[in-house]
Amino acid sequence: MSGRAKLTLFAALATLLTSWSLNALVDSQAWLLQAALLLAVQSAVGAGARRVPLARTLTVAAQVLTSLLLLAFLYAGKGESHGDGPLAYLVTDFGALFGQGVRDVGEFAIPAPLTDGIKLLLVSGVLLIGLLVDTLAVTMRTAAAAGLPLLALYSVASGLAGGGGASWFAFLLAGCGYLMLLLSEGRDRLAQWGRVFGAAPRRGAADSGLAGGAGGQATAPVKFGRRIGAVTLGLALAVPAVLPSLGGGLLGGTQDAAEDSGGGVGGTISAVNPLVSLQSNLNAQDNRVVLKYRTNSPQQADQYLRILALDEFNGVKWEASGRALVDVPEKLPEPPGLRAPVSRSAVEVTTSISAADYYTQRYLPMPYPATSVEIGGKWRFEPAGRTLVGDQLGRDKFQNVQGAEYTVRSLLLKPTAQQLQSAPKPDPAVQEEYTKLPDNLPPVVAETARQVTQGAKDDYTRAVKLQDYFAVNGGFRYNTRTASGTGPQAVARFLADKEGFCVHFAFSMAAMSRSLGIPARVAVGFTPGEKQSDGNVNVSMRDAHAWPELYFEGVGWTRFEPTPRSGINIPEYSRAQTPATQPSAPAPLPSQSVAQPSTGPSATPECPPNLKKLGECGAAAPAQSTGGGGGPSVTSVLGWAALAVAVLGLPLLPMLWRTRLRARRLATGEVLTAWREVGDTAWDAGVLPDEALSPRRAASRIVELGRLDEEPAAAVHRIAGAVERALYAPPGAEVSYPELADDVLLARTGLLASADRLPRLRTLLLPRSAARVAWAFSARRSAIAAAVSTRLTTARLRLLLLPLRGRG
């Protein structure tokens, strides 16, 4: 292997070892094998282009084009574009999947699920770094500068992953890869000055890629380089462990910019907005179950699992305000605002919940209002929002709900519409805090709220009218593809476009309620989920939800449901007290992202539209499945099938070539062709050909070195005798015999039988005589090059002679 070929190999290996650090960002390592295969193809294209040779720019262009074609072949068809034709398949759809990956990176917590978009980002990122390393180290011959893209790759991965127990191993792999690249490049530079002499080689030592001397004995410069590399890596791993102040950085991860206080009453929570991933969960293709629970609640349809409440609207977004944390009491305090007679009619229910191992939420999902929680680990309690949040466990590590099993006791409140309607004025402190609105809120929000609630005499009636405006008669459509803006202009835009998902409905109703003087906030969590046959309830990613909570004195924080989404249960107390026969505005048309209506019969025709929207007319007929909606496309199936055939067929090509060549030779019936087949078969079995020997001497050599038995040996001698007769017989004499093909096969069987298992397997799968293909290709290429050169020379001479003919 030449020095440049070794440098190409170690450049790809350094990139692959450094990319190992990206494994901490996702929950699966399946992408790494794909990245390694594509990186190998990209490096092989670069090596071939440099061997031609091509210009440096053309070499890089060939690698880029090959990588883009491979990525498009593997990932096209997995995006969400709606174009037609090859351009949409290879470009538009490919770009859509890339954009989806960017959104997934911003929405999922680490370790993120390995979606197609994230996999595309990881693989294309490794290919980009590999291209830079290959260009700098091999094409430009500056291996030291190739450490910069490798450092960038490791730094990004380590910074996002925040260090961890395995970060030292990733650093060790990356460092070893870079040092091997430097040693390979240094040895190649030394070799250009001549042979490097070192100590006497050890007898029988084998040559290796990094050994500088003959027979595998490393030369002095290589030994010295190895020692420097080993000491450097050792110091890089040991010094941060000895000096804790150096624990940050590339080995120790990064310190959280807004680190929560670990203990004491003075600790506060500065909540990260959980709505960042809510839209992604609603649109997730793999609707994974994140929670399972079992409850004794008589109203399981009202069993919402609440994560936390967003109580501050700062003009840009809704978020949870920073509040003091306390230790979790054995019995949680009474819910704010709850008084008799509602408290006397409340029923305490018990819910046992288990979280999936991949669900890493820091806030504990539980029914509201909880009275006690039994859970292991370190948790803190925020009294105003009645939220449990994971405490700090160590440097950049916090308690979360991942894989937790816990039991929550909570109150099932049953307020009536009359109790809410007659609720007294709220506490002044609550009124002041939860009715704040930003100064830049568009006037249309308050104006719309006043128009919708015109004629209402109390806060409860106003709240019900706002809920019905969004869910029933306002003409709003549910669409999870709508951009999830949360600022004041987003609320005004939502009121104008009348299309959005739960975030828009919850935020808008909360803002409009505050404009009417009703204390309001937004809760985030999950809808009740789907009950299973074994009694458990599964809560999946698409059950993620946001809803407004309005405060009523004597009841406390009360859930309302303005989102017109199928499967949403409207609370009994918030249903409009209107006659069932009263018609309402016509139902709005569904958005493009909503499933098409079923062609089957609908629910009772006499059911009013407003009750249909509230889910009071029975279950809707199941939607009919459309043939083109699911499953892979024909193009994807054919592409993957072609890839599988290529992967499985490539290792078998030498064997298939030899089998076909053997059949063609034996079909001719010619003695010399059969003798050539015997020689190639012996070559495959390890008996190197010797063209200087006579047929009789060659046959004796094959019998001796091939350790043939009596019958195969006799067959080889018979064929050799026929060859001698064919060479020295008079012209026109017939020298072939009917058993010629049988003797060739008998000799082949003997050669295979005398070999051990591994050599026999190599003889079948990787025959040595397949080198004739490379020889033939090289000869053909040389012949073509010579013919082209001759034609060019002739054409040039003719062009030079043209002016002379003109003069005559």
Image: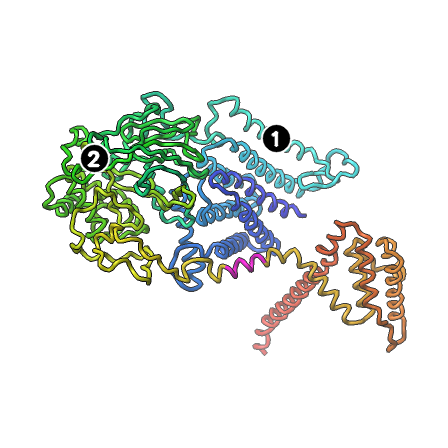
**Compared to 384, does 679 lie above or below?**
below
Q: Where is residue 131 shown, x and y percent of the image? A: 52, 48
Question: Relative to 139, is 352 on the left or the right?
Answer: left
Location of mark 1 (residue): 230
Could you say which quadrant of the image residue 191 lies in? top right
The quadrant of the image that shows the C terminus is bottom right
Report the amino acid beneath label 1: Ala
Question: Relative to 434, is 301 on the left or the right?
Answer: right
Query: How many labels sit on residues?
Result: 2
Could you say which quadrant of the image residue 727 lies in? bottom right
Can residue 778 be seen in the rendering of this structure? yes
Can residue 497 be seen in the rendering of this structure? no
Report the amino acid beneath label 2: Tyr
Q: Nearer the viewer, residue 45 or 212?
A: 45
In terms of secondary structure, where does tag 2 sit?
Answer: strand
Disc 2/disc 1 C-alpha distance (Å): 66 Å
The residue positioned 76% from the left and 53% from the top of the image is 760
Q: Is residue 641 shown in magenta?
A: yes
In terms of secondary structure, where does tag 1 sit?
Answer: helix
Location of mark 2 (residue): 551
Q: Main secondary structure of the magenta part?
A: helix
Q: How is the image coloured?
A: rainbow
Q: Is residue 640 shown in magenta?
A: yes
Residue range in magenta is: 637-644
Q: Where is residue 583 shown, x and y percent of the image? A: 17, 56
The residue positioned 77% from the left and 72% from the top of the image is 668
**Compared to 725, does 619 lie above or below?**
above
Question: Relative to 113, is 37 on the left or the right?
Answer: right
Q: Where is residue 162 shown, x and y percent of the image? A: 45, 33
